[in-house]
Image: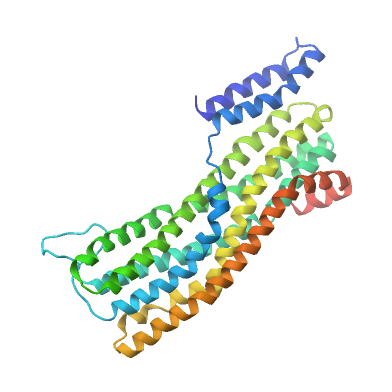
Amino acid sequence: MNIAIKILVFSLWLFDIVNSGTVDNSLAEESILNIKSKILLNRNSVEKKPDDHILVEQWQDYVLANAILANYLNILMVHASKSDFSLLKESNDCTTYIKNPNSFRQTISQLSDNIRHILLDLYKDLNHIQIGLERFPIHLKTILLLIKKGNNDSISIYLPKLLKKGENIVNESLFILKNPKIKIEQVKDLLIELNSLISNVTPDISFTLQIEDVKTQWTLFHDLFTQLSIQAENAINDFLLQFNWILEQFIQLNINNYRDLIINLLKLKVIEIERTIDLLTIISQTYVDISLEYANEKIISNTHLISISDEQERKEIIKQYRYELQPIAVKFARLALTRHNEFLQRIQNRERIYEDFLNEMSENDLNLLLTIN
C-alpha cells in the first residue's frame, strides 16, 4: 500500500472519530490519545527514508571537492596544451559522450566547459537555497507558537497562510537540489569514457593520472549531490506529507482541548525537519563560500590554459597550482569543521531551545512574529 493510500485511509478513520455523533466523550478522548501512536506507526510503515549519517559524516570532504576539482581541472588543461592527438586507437571506433574523439585537446575543452557551466549553475542554486532556508526555522517556531498561544480565530486566519508560505519555501528551495543530477551524471560518464581511452593512445602517464584525479573529485561531487537530493526529498516529504498533514487533521478538532497533544506531536516532527534544513543550509553556505573565494575564479579564467605554448610557463603554472592547493584546502577544511561542530551542538540543544521558546514567548511576541512571517 503506497503512502497516499495509507494517508487517505488514516484520514478517513480520524474524520470518522472526530465527527461521529454517537461516540461519547471518554471514547473520543481515548481515540484522540491513540492518534500519536497511530501517526508514528503510519510514519514508520510508509517512510523508509535513508539515514543521513553518510551526508553528516562526509559532507566536509564532499564540499572540499569544489576547490580541489577546480585546481586539478586547470592542471589538466595545462597538460593538454602540450600536444593534441586522437583518442581512437582504430579509425572505426566510436564514442558515446566525447564529441570530438579525434582531438584530445578539444575533448578537454568540452570537459572544462561542461564542468564550468555546472559549477556556476550550482553556485547560483545553492546561494538561492541558503538565502531561502535562512528564516525557515523561525517560520516553524511561529507555527508552533501559534498553536500554543493563539486563539481559534487567529489560528484559522494565520495557520493556512503560514502553511502555504512554508510549502512555497520548501518547494522553491529544495526542489532545486533535484535538478542537477542528470548533468552531473553526464560529466561523470564523459570522464569514465575519457579515462578508458587515454591510456591506450599515449605513453604520457601525466595525462592519465591527472584525468584520474579530476574523476575522483567529480565522483565526490556526484556523491554530494546524490545525498543532497535524498535529504531534500526527505525534507519535502516531512513538511508536505507529514507536518502539514498532522495540522490539517487536528484543525478539525477543538484546539483548546488538544493543544498540548498537537504541540507534542508537531515538536518531534519540527525538530526532525529543522535538523535536515540545518544540514542542507550549512552545506550550501560552505559550498558558496568556497566558490566565491576560490573555485569560481579558477574555472572562469581557465580557457587560456589549453593554449599555452611555452614549456617553462607550463611548469611554472602547474607548480603554482600545486603550491596553492594545500593552504586553501586546509583553510576550507577548517571552515567546514567549525560549521560541522556548530551543527552537532545545535542538534544537542534543539529540543531545549524549542521548549524555552514556547515557554518564554508571549502573545505579543506571537503577534510580532506573525507580522514578519
**Residue under the point 72% across and 37% down:** 266
Query: Which residue is at the front of the view, 350 or 341?
Result: 341
Q: In this view, does 77 lie above or below 364?
A: below
Query: Which residue is at the front of the view, 226 or 219?
Result: 219
Q: Is residue 120 above or below residue 81?
A: above
Occupied quadrant, residue 303 = bottom left
**In the image, is 86 to the left or to the right of 131?**
left
Occupied quadrant, residue 43 = top right
Q: What's the colour scheme?
A: rainbow
**In the image, is 27 to the left or to the right of 54?**
right
Image coordinates for residue 5, horizontal then vertical, percent = 53, 25
**Residue under the point 85% across and 40% down:** 149
Image coordinates for residue 116, horizontal then vertical, percent = 41, 69
Q: For the view shown, which residue lies furthest in the top direction?
A: 22
Image coordinates for residue 199, horizontal then vertical, percent = 23, 66
**Residue under the point 51% across and 53% down:** 177
Query: Which residue is at the front of the view, 165 or 201?
Result: 201
**In the image, is 222 to the left or to the right of 45?**
left
Image coordinates for residue 133, horizontal then vertical, percent = 64, 55
Q: Is residue 242 above or below residue 226?
A: above
Q: Is residue 80 above or below residue 186?
A: below
Query: Which residue is at the front of the view, 257 or 325?
Result: 325
Total number of numbered discs in the rendering: 0
